[in-house]
Amino acid sequence: MKINLTQKIIATLSVLLVSSTGFAATNYSTPVFTYGGNITLQNGDTVIINEASYLGYVVNAREGTITVKNPATDGIYVSVGTSKNPILNTGGDFYSGGMRPVISQINSYVNLGTNTTIETFSDSANVTATGILATTNSSVIAGDNLTIRFNGTYGTGSYGISAINDSSITIGDNLKVYAAGGGNIAIMVSGGGNITVGDNAYIEAGLGLNARINSSITMQNSTIRGVGSNGVGINTAPGGIIDITNSDIYGERNAITVPGVGGPTGIVTVSGGTLTSDAGAVIGSGETSETSNASSSTVIIKDGAKASSLTGVFFEGELTPSVGSELEIKVMGSDTIVEGRFLDGTNLDTTFSISDGATWNSVGASNMDSLSLEDANINIVLTSASDRIVTDNLTLDGTTVMNVGLTNEFLEEVIAMGLPQDFDVSIVASFTDGTGTIAYDIATSNDEGSTWSIDDLGNGIYRIYDITLVPEPSTYAMIFGALALALAIYRRRK
């Protein structure tokens, strides 16, 4: 059956095979639409383009089925708008309208096959888009090498892939989602939605992954990047479950954010791989104007995962969540290492657990509401005599080893106080529970080459003396003086 290039393809209570020559539509909002019927797209040469200037649906299954005839080998190309004719207005947000290249709704099924590409083109902040949407007991399957690309400018509330209202999306290996922009989310689930992605995915958006209200996302062996000044790799909202294995998670601001608004506990599990951030802490808290609906979140980092930030902060209560909100961060396993200070926030009850040989590296002071240590390793470098780990509640099980290093700034401070000088490196806790112990080990030299002598007075208290600073303050003065003299001579000669 051949289809004219401007013909709208509709199947209502019927079966329709689309010609292998492909088709396009320029004057219709939904060129491929089934209501209670079945549409089969025959092969990978099928190209579907919608250049409608107002509202862009392209492949739309409602109480029906749309499939590629040979999904194991063939795919399709779907585009809303073109580079020459971008969509100017979608007439509403995600829920009331928007650009939806592929939608499976109300007990429907869509199979996009293999090597499918979905693109949208927008030239307006009024435009929102959802590359693939499954809603209301529906499903979408895409094989390997699915690519979704948002081109141009979009408004807040655009999603690369979304499953909501008890729907599911299953995607094979080598998924690529390019949805860069502060308001765009690469993958979002809500209301019982579930998305499963195969290996070697690459996700890039303002927010990589977002799970809400009893929904889940599962990925492995992939790259997730939250880009832009507020870029976040993963956000779990109330009731969302995100499970990531052996993947690299990056946020230009935070690798993970936890919710500020209340509801069921949201859980993020990172097994292996890396968590990194640039401008903010590895993990940051969200913000809300509510005061009566507290949030609850759990972040689990295990199985050799590594976490670090350019800021030197592991967790920070950067924004203010609802009063009474709770966050538990669990770091587990002998090869698991997290780096950075832990900085408690307002309205947030924080619990930091380190167990089973996991390691926490930090420079400077940290504070949290509760700290649980079970056979943990802590490597802390003190930059000031006042640097301590402070918590309201300390729980100890097994033996925790705490290695303490001292910077030249610390040494200069204690020299100014007068030597010998006693100082305390023990964890400051209002209440301590458990039968475990902490074994302290204090270094006697640092990377700058400075050395000192230490006497162990017990219970984390040490006496320091015989400090040799390298270079010593007088040496710094000589260096700066020589530089100043050289600069003066150079200027005089010019």
Image: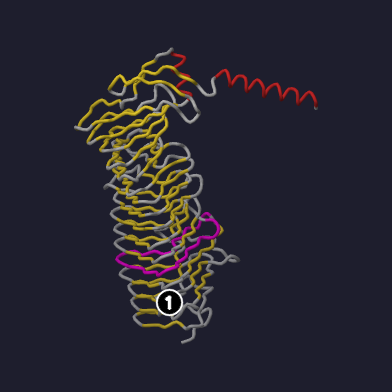
Question: Who is closer to the viewer here, 71 or 181?
Answer: 71
Q: Is residue 137 magenta?
A: yes
Question: Who is closer to the viewer here, 121 or 481?
Answer: 481
Total marks in image: 1
Residue at horizontal 27 percent and vertical 47 percent from the top: 265
Residue 221 to residue 62: above or below: above
- Where residue 116 appears, x then y in whole percent? 46, 70
Q: Quadrant of the C terminus?
A: top right
**Mark 1 is on which residue type?**
Thr
Quarter of the rendering containing residue 85: bottom right
Question: Who is closer to the viewer here, 327 or 384?
Answer: 384
Q: Residue furthest left?
A: 435
Residue 106 to residue 7: above or below: above
Q: Residue furthest right?
A: 494
Residue tagged 1: 73
Quarter of the rendering containing residue 472: top right
- Magenta stretch, residue numbers: 125-153
Residue at horizontal 50 percent and vertical 21 percent from the top: 469
Element marked by disc 1: loop
Q: Is residue 360 magenta?
A: no
- Where residue 36 appears, x then y in whole percent? 33, 76
Question: Who is closer to the viewer here, 420 or 181?
Answer: 420
Q: Residue furthest bottom?
A: 1
- How does the figure colour the protein chain or chains? secondary structure
